[in-house]
Image: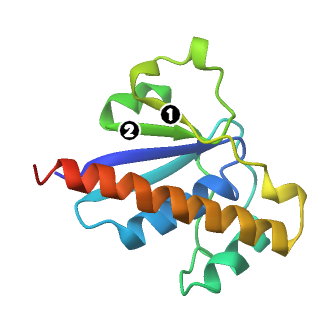
Amino acid sequence: MARKVLFICGENAARSQMAEALFNSMAKEWRAESAGTNPAARVNPLAVEALRELGLDISGATPKALDTGSLDDYDRIISFGCIAKAAFPARDRLEEWPLPDPGKGDLEMMREVRDEIRRRITELLADLEGESKG
């Protein structure tokens, strides 16, 4: 069974959706899922466009609610600054990537956040997939 990472943001409409798609397109041995603490009705169209520019299609993705009962399924949990860490049950596996919410901006802001997420995922995968070979 593949080891898993969970990406969490407020609405599961932009940052965590982009992170899930980018991670899964780059990972060899790990899988990612995403969720939101207050899911939106749909994925942000600017996030869809920003990933389409990289050849990734998330147009069919749907925001999902965070299920705190399933946290044991994940080896790593990454929040985009929307979790009250003191109240979170899996604090030992929670990592914060406090990036601005691009849903409040334009396509250029979405691209900047996308590129920063991609950079961080590249580093994360070097760590995760490097450790599993050792």
How far apart are the two marked residues, 2 and 1, measured between alpha carbons? 8 Å
Residue under label 2: 76
Disc 1 crowd, CA 10 A, few/some/many (<14, 14-19, 20+): some
* Residue in front for this viewpoint, 96 or 82: 96
The residue sitting at 43% across, 62% down in the picture is: 122
Q: Is residue 68 visible?
A: yes
Q: Amino acid at mark 1?
A: Glu
Q: Earlier in the sequence, mark 2 or mark 1?
A: 2
Q: Name which residue lies at 79% across and 50% down.
A: 101
Q: Residue at x 49, y 27 (%)?
A: 68
Q: In the image, 86: left or right of 110? A: left
The local crowd at label 2, few if under 14, some if 14 to 19, many if 20 or more residues have their Cα within 10 Å, is some
Name the residue furthest left. 134
The amino acid marked with disc number 2 is Arg
Residue 117 lies, with reference to residue 87, above or below; the image says below
Provide residue 50's location: percent of width, then percent of height: 69, 77
Look at 66% across and 35% down and name the residue there: 37
User: Dividing the picture into quarters, in which one does residue 112 lie?
Assistant: bottom right
- Examine the image and state in which quarter residue 41 appears: bottom right
Q: Secondary structure at mark 1?
A: strand
> Horizontally, is 115 left or right of 109 in the view?
left
Q: Is residue 73 above or below residue 4?
A: above
Query: Mark 2–mark 1 contact, CB under 8 Å?
Result: yes
Residue 43 appears anywhere in the view: no
SS for callout 2: strand
Residue that badge 1 annotates = 95
Q: Is residue 16 above or below residue 9?
A: below
Q: Vertically, is 124 above or below 98? A: below
Question: Which labelled disc corresponds to residue 77?
Answer: none
> Residue 89: where, in percent of width, then height?
47, 17
